[in-house]
Image: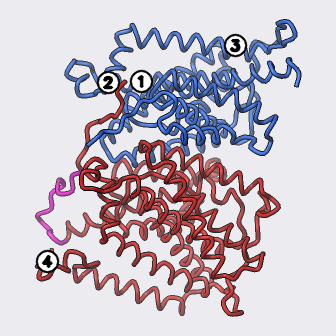
């Protein structure tokens, strides 16, 4: 186990205080920059999709993992990003302008939703977001003159200065740039006072208010940021799908995003990366699983939601800290080899507290 | 619009509202006892209808219904005693998410067992009665009467029965209830049994109107919206809210086809904008 001697105040806010972490992140950056020269188009597209999911995960993680507000409707923000960025180029908007408009509209809608729900009890927000996602799906499905209705909409490729990004490696580089920016931005945000107040609101609204934090404003900020980042992920995801329909971004997608942040590990940025990797690989694993199972089960539709649900339930019961927590524990076991005790990472449980009087 | 049409829609609305109310009752009971919003409650209702369909093919209609309600009660008991009890006191976000995951598991499992196509549910109380110019379907009337009976029974149960009062006690303060030697864990499981059984009854009595398929669980979300309108945690509020949504829907479908299917949700958003705590206020923000 490395011991960190704090020799300057910057040690408290460094992104990567340990040397081992710096080496691992360096290797990861090196790999991400070099793999496009080796992989074929299909694998590169999958890797790009992984980055897009990771961006969406960062968006949801800011809200659910760091501010403690559960959203069951983040698929709706993906839908807004995807649709706005696909519709505006038809009316002659440039790529940069339509992407900006997509992120802005998603963020503004997020802020409005956050504004109308910020004064509510925790689970009201969860239900309001669920209903919001149903409303958005219906709106995009009904407005078929603009969005193509339930039949779907062709997504125009990005174009910069007359060049169209149609190849897989174009998309990969765009995804990588945005992923790097978002990860750096989120990490930076979390060591600023805004990010710290997010965490304070998650841990105790009462103490946050005592410290002079305007709780409902913090929730609105968190919601707007989260919706904006998820909207950006929606823009990029539309580029990968090339054809969007309203039910792509329905409740199933929202559940997948939640699965990503919960299984990855709530409250860690590393969790987004783990969760996104899981989400990209899971369909492939399920395909293998179908070969193993008897055909009466394997050929049924609906195996995916069953497996997703089961994974989510098992993780919440047995490893609520997610893959990131498991990674931390495994490292601690190795570093402190004979001295690890199971209750080093014991979680604090709370008694039921109710705000109801009747 | 003639007076007959008006009353037909009104009665359809009231009976639909009563169905929502029965489902919402389950939500509210579980929420009051454990502070958990069970998002898979609509799926309990779907499973109830499927089980009733399955059993009634073998043992006759009414026995099948009773068996289905018992099976759902058992499912509620197992869900609480095996899983929810283990994760009590965990991060509330995780508890919401786990119940949503249950919903997905139940829906997929039901689709795999009974197929994804809608199945017709045998009608009961076929026929109509005429009150002056108004024609009423008996099955609609049955839901309304049954709901009223259930509401009264539950009211009596919670006001006078020892177990009902114990349930109220744990919903207010678990620690204090434990000091009063109430078996908190067992009582909580019984609340789940009650909620699941009521959901099954609602599912069975709603089934003739909607057919039975894996998507009827989404009615649960409407019931949730109704419970929120009434102020979550209040049983009369939940019933009033669900009646509002139920009566609103057929009329708005007729006059505002643009919002078909989502008028209940819009009503929820509008009411929450005006009264963020619902019609009957239950929560009070702590002042520092």
Q: Earlier in the sequence, mark 2 or mark 3?
A: 3
Label at residue B256: none
Marks 4 and 1: same chain?
no
Chain B is which colour? blue
Task: Confirm or deny contact between disc 1 and disc 2 (CB under 8 A).
Answer: yes
Query: How far apart are labels 1 and 2 at the CA level?
Result: 10 Å
Tag 2 residue:
B170
Position of the N terminus of chain A by quadrant: bottom left
**Bounds of the magenta segment:** A335-347
x 28%, y 53%: residue:
A208
Tag 1 residue:
B191
Q: Chain of mark 2?
A: B
Tag 3 residue:
B142
Tag 4 residue:
A4
As drawn, B183 above or below B142: below
Task: Confirm or deny contact between disc 3 and disc 1 (CB under 8 A).
Answer: no
Marks 1 and 2: same chain?
yes
């Amino acid at each position: 186990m490395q011991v960190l001697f704090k020799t300057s105040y910057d040690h408290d806010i460094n992104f990567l205080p340990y040397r081992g972490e710096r080496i691992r992140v360096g290797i990861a950056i090196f790999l991400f920059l070099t793999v496009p020269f080796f992989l074929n188009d299909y694998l590169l597209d999958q890797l790009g999709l992984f980055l897009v999911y990771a961006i969406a995960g960062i968006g949801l993680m800011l809200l659910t993992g760091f501010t403690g507000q559960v959203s069951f409707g983040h698929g709706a923000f993906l839908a807004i990003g995807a649709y706005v960025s696909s519709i505006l180029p038809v009316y002659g908007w440039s790529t940069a302008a339509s992407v900006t408009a997509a992120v802005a509209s998603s963020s503004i809608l997020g802020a409005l939703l956050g504004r109308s729900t910020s004064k509510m009890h925790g689970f009201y927000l969860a239900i309001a977001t669920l209903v919001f996602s149903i409303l958005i799906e219906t709106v995009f499905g009904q407005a078929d003159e603009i969005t193509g209705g339930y039949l779907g909409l062709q997504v125009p490729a990005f174009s910069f200065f007359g060049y169209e990004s149609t190849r897989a490696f174009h998309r990969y580089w765009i995804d990588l740039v945005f992923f790097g920016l978002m990860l750096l931005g989120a990490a930076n945000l979390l060591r600023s006072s805004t990010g710290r107040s997010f965490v304070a609101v998650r841990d105790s609204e009462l103490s946050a208010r005592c410290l002079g934090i305007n709780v409902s404003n913090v929730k609105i900020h968190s919601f707007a940021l989260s919706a904006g980042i998820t909207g950006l992920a929606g823009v990029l995801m539309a580029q990968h799908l090339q054809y969007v329909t309203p039910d792509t971004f329905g409740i199933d997608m929202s559940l997948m995003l939640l699965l990503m942040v919960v299984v990855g590990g709530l409250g860690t940025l590393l969790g987004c990366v783990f969760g996104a990797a899981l989400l990209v690989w899971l369909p492939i694993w399920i395909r293998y699983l179908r070969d193993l199972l008897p055909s009466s089960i394997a050929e049924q539709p609906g195996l995916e939601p069953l497996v997703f649900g089961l994974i989510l339930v098992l993780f919440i019961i047995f490893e609520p800290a997610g893959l990131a927590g498991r990674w931390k524990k495994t490292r601690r076991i190795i570093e402190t080899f004979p001295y690890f005790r199971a209750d080093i990472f014991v979680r604090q449980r709370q008694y039921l507290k109710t705000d109801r009087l009747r | 619009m003639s007076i007959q049409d008006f009353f037909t829609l009104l009665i359809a609305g009231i009976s639909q509202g009563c169905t929502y109310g029965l489902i919402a009752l389950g939500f509210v009971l579980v929420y009051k006892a454990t502070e958990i919003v069970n998002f898979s409650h609509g799926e309990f209702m779907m499973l109830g209808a499927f089980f009733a369909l399955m059993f009634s093919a073998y043992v006759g209609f009414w026995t099948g219904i009773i068996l289905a309600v018992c099976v759902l009660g058992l499912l509620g008991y197992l869900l609480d005693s095996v899983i929810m009890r283990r994760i009590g006191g965990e991060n509330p976000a995780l508890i919401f998410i786990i119940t949503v995951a249950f919903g997905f598991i139940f829906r997929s499992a039901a689709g795999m067992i009974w197929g994804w196509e809608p199945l017709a549910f045998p009608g009961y109380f076929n026929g109509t009665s005429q009150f002056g110019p108004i024609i009423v379907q008996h099955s609609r009337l049955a839901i309304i009467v049954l709901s009223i009976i259930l509401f009264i029974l539950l009211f009596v149960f919670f006001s006078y029965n020892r177990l009902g009062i114990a349930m109220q006690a744990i919903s207010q303060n678990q620690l204090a209830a434990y000091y009063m030697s109430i078996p908190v864990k067992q009582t909580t499981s019984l609340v789940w049994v009650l909620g699941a059984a009521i959901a099954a009854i609602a599912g069975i009595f709603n089934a003739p109107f909607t057919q039975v398929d894996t998507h009827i669980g989404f009615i649960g979300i409407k019931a949730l919206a109704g419970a929120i309108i009434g102020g979550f945690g209040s049983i009369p509020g939940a019933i009033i809210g669900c009646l509002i949504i139920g009566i609103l829907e057929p009329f708005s479908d007729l006059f505002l086809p643009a919002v078909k299917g989502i008028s209940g949700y819009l009503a929820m958003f509008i009411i929450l904008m005006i009264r963020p705590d619902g019609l009957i206020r239950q929560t009070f923000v702590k002042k520092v």
